[in-house]
Amino acid sequence: MNDQANEVQLDDLPLRHWAVIHTLRPAVAPADRELLLRLTELGFLPGERVRITAEGPGGREPLAVRVGHTTFALRRREASFILVRPHA
Amino acid sequence: MVVDITLPAHIALLGNPNCGKTALFNLLTGSRQKVANYAGVTVERKEGTLHTASGRRVRVLDLPGAYSLNAISNDEAVTRDVVTGRSTELLPDLLVCVVDATNLRLHLRLVLEARRLGIPLLVAVNKSDRAERLGIRIDMNRLESELGVPVVRTVGVSVSGARELLARLDVPVSTAASSAWHAPDIHAVTHTQQEVHRIYEAVVTEPAVDHDPSDRIDRVLMHPWWGLLILTAVLFVIFIAVFSIGDVLAGGIEAGFGWLAGLLATRMDDGLLRGLLVEGVIGGVGGVLVFLPQILILFFFILALESSGYLPRAAFLLDRPMSKAGLSGRSFIPLLSSFACAIPGIMATRSITDRHARLTTILIAPLMACSARIPVYTLLVAALFPGEPFTATLIMVGLYALGVASAMAVAWVIQRGRRTRTPLLMELPSYEWPDVRSLLIGLWERAMIFLRRVGTIILALTIIMWALYTIPSPRAHADGSPMERSIAGEIGRGLEYVFRPIGFNEHIAIALVPGMAAREVVVSSLGLVYAMEGDADEVGAQLEERISAEWSLATKLSLLLWMVFAPQCISTFVAVKRETGSWKYMWLMGGYLFALAYLASLFTYQLTNALTA
């Protein structure tokens, strides 16, 4: 129960707060399935620590997301597939 | 079963983008490199030779960087096809999988994927010096036994950094055989990643505190406002450097050619050959060669900023503004390169994964004012505002801005109504000092490409131009100036019908013809048609005077606008055809640019005439 309430989309995570990936939201469209495959290949996996290190000018798009030793620029839409649990 | 064993004779470097593969390739092969294109695509194919520890020669292919063999970009597709035996390339005897020691978590996955290919594998743990500095310890023996393939340590940026690798290349390997490769599904990928995780935990010891300063640097450089301000300052400094330092060096080259022309003029008898050499070859080639410093300075900054990790950050900052025009931040680097020359810019679009966004970027790349336009702009602006350097500078900036603004407008029109859902997924690599060797090799490559162009197409064009203006037309009347009696004069009179409404006289019309092949030669062609003598500097000064005096304000403005939009040089057309694989886009680009140029010039000419009448 508590866990469920605790889970947020990566794009809703506050700037520079660490979180742990819980799961990737399943995709329906073929293009989105491809996206999930690539995200998995790049290391966005359950159990990995992530945080948003920067937001684009104006505080919207895109997001710079740190996972492991790598930082990737993602759009909010891509980040929304990644469900995370923020550190308490 | 007998397994054949051979010494590897040709190997390929495989690795993620940003694994330091290019620096390692440059270290291995030095200047023994050949840059070409893969059959049918403009992905750069880099091959070189190395000498192993025992002195054996081995061919090395530097494959385009790939996160995965499950390709989503042109780069990755080329890599996949080579290592799976689907291309016309020979299957390598040995695959050297280069991984970044500071980022094994990401890079090991490609090793596991490559292990299934049936090609003997060797893993090079690169940037191992940097890993040491950051306190990351890797158990090499354990890594070797976990992967079941040989593992060596390399440092791409150090002179002795490839010693272990070169020694290992003298060990025989079993014969490569391509196996049937299938794109993995998400379950297979997840399974591989679990294996990566297990190996990583067993092999790598990380410090409790992350010593990578990148996050701290990013707090400033990627700050929403400071970041944009710094980016603006960086671009400003680049353009100042191109114009100021480039101008000084260009002056030196000009003086050199002037001396050469003077020497020939005094030592040779007046005649056709002297005319050809002094006016045609030295005047034409010298007039183009003066841009070499400007092109190299621009590329110096682009290469240095790219290898330091800053350019992807710039692309990040500009992603949102560019998405208004239907593009993404990924188009930033190709468009920046296009200010030097559209061809490397078009080639840099290969990293744009979305086909539509990539085509759009290719189509608008020629609107970025390439360095070949600098002399024409300089001449016309100086003639328009003689003795007003401040206004002239302002107009120059305006011309660049007009190019960028129209590019964004054209992109917006092309992408109109198309909601872009292309993922960005762009790596922002750790900051690093640029590798000096790779920087110099990169500049050398660019210089050679330019010089080859000057020595072939531009030399040929200037000679043809000179001939057209020297040889009398059979249909011409006996009276009139040599120019009016020449074949060039005849062609100019024909073209005048097309160009009269936009205010171009026959002299301009004829100078524009070779300009379509290589726009740098417009200035020297004008010098030829006005029958001017002397070195490039003197011709420039005389032209400026003639233009100020003889052309109307409307004509000068009209020609400036024409140069902003007019279809790019033939080499660009060839690059577009090859890159898009279709004549359609090439003609589309040529057509829209011509229409834009004609309409802009027509509007400017008629409006200026109406206002000044």
Image: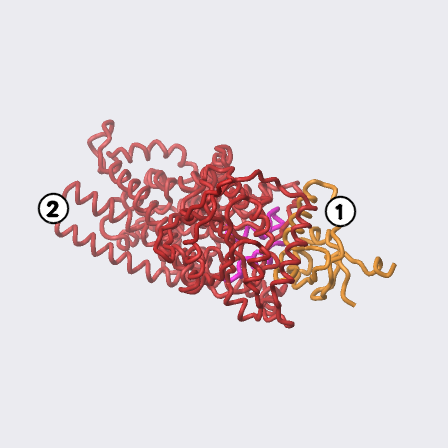
Chain colours: A orange, B red
Residue receiving disc 1: A26
User: Closest to the observer: B582 or B267?
Assistant: B582
Give the residue type at disc 1: Pro
Q: Are marks 1 and 2 on the same chain?
A: no
Q: How many marks?
A: 2
**Disc 2 packing (10 Å; few <14; some 14–19; many ≥20):** few
Q: Nearer the viewer, residue B74 or B486?
A: B74
The boundaries of the magenta stretch are: B308-335
Asked if the stretch drawn in magenta spans residue B320, the answer is: yes
The residue where tag 2 is placed is: B269
In front: label 1 or label 2: 1
Q: Position of residue B301 (x, y in %)?
A: 45, 60
Query: Regarding mark 1 in the picture, which secondary structure is present there?
Result: loop
Q: Could you tell me which residue is drawn at 17 percent across and 42 percent down?
A: B273
Q: Please name the residue shown 84% across and 59% down the image.
A: A5
Q: CA distance from mark 1 to mark 2?
A: 82 Å
